[in-house]
Image (cartoon, rainbow, N blue to C red):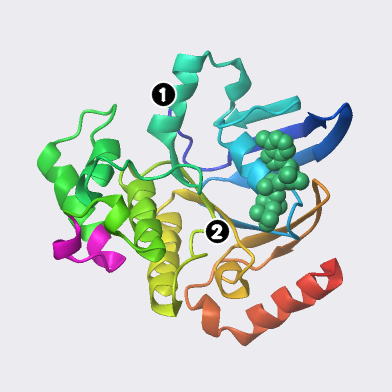
Amino acid sequence: MTQIQQQGTVLKASQISKTYAHDGLQQHILVNLDLDITRGEYVVVMGPSGAGKSTLMHVLSGMDSPTLGEIEFDGAAIGALNPRRLTDFRRDHCGFVFQQIHLLDSLSVLDNVLAVGLLGRRRRRAEVVRRAGELLDRVGIEEADRGKFPAMLSGGEAQRVAVVRALINSPAVVFADEPTGQLNSESSSAVLDLLGEVSAGGQTVLVVTHDLRSALRGDRVLYLRDGAIRGECVLGRRRDAEHDHDRLSRLTGFLDEMGW
Ligand SMILES: Nc1ncnc2c1ncn2[C@@H]1O[C@H](COP(=O)(O)OP(=O)(O)OP(=O)(O)O)[C@@H](O)[C@H]1O
């Protein structure tokens, strides 16, 4: 895998389809979908339940493979990687906030984060510990809670730890499926601020959400229905996204048009 380009397309999906077979019937979840994502872009995916949003995230991140079509990361087809290289790709370049990727029950909060932070790349432990502390502070996980095991956390706390774990390696692409689904307004803002910052710093962020406030943070909002992108709303970059009325009216207008 080559070095990440400084600009241009970081992730490209060409004519991807995903089909599942149920009782002899085929269910087409993604249908001939094309998508180009620019390095550093903050892309939001919205759409009705069952539209294929999570499936799209799984396929784009190499967690699952498309039935047809190709995904390229930085110009290299990830479908051509053998299982070991694919694991390396995910470890070195991707961060995940997916419901299916649970925290490890046998590790404390801090160790869950460090386990990912110390994987693969040679990084100084002290530096990883410092960064973990900084990120945990940012999402409001107190020092006293960092020795706790996942079973002792609320759903919202676990979700915030999962966000920190996804960011600890400064991955090129952060895939976040409903990262604020279990959070109150204050914690949501903390998580969304962090995602905005990493994107401003050049990392690419992909967020699936049903929440308008979360969607307002995106540079571009895609609307997925029946496995295809039915439209997109380019909001552009804006720091104070939640208080920008023009941005809100453009997004709500777009979502009305999409039948949301
Ligand atoms: N592994 C699987 N095997 C069979 N069907 C699947 C599988 N994964 C997803 N599906 C089906 O694909 C469809 C799309 O699911 P997906 O989770 O991608 O939708 P979504 O847009 O993320 O929905 P939601 O907003 O409710 O999370 C659903 O009908 C789901 O049942």
Mark 1 is on which residue type? Asp
Of labels 2 and 1, the one closer to you:
2
Q: Which mark is residue 178?
A: 2
Residue 119 horizontal/vertical position (percent): 27, 30
Task: Look at the picture and state if 79 lies above or below 208.
Answer: above
| Vertical side of 217 occupied by 151: above or below | above
CA separation in Å, label 2 and label 1: 25 Å
> Which residues make up the magenta segment?
136-146
Residue wearing tag 1 = 88
Residue at the far top in the pictured view: 82
Q: Earlier in the sequence, mark 2 or mark 1?
A: 1
Seen at 70% across and 74% down, the residue is 251
Residue type marked 2: Glu
Badge 2: few (under 14), some or many (20 or more) residues near its Cα, within 10 Å? some
Name the element at disc 2.
loop
The answer to whether the beta carbon of the residue marked 1 is less than 8 Å from any atom of ligand 1 is no
Residue at horizontal 60 percent and vertical 67 percent from the top: 215
Q: Residue furthest left?
A: 126
Whether the residue carrying mark 2 lies under 8 Å from ligand 1 is answered with: yes
Report the side of 66 relative to 44 (left or right): right
Q: Which mark is residue 189?
A: none
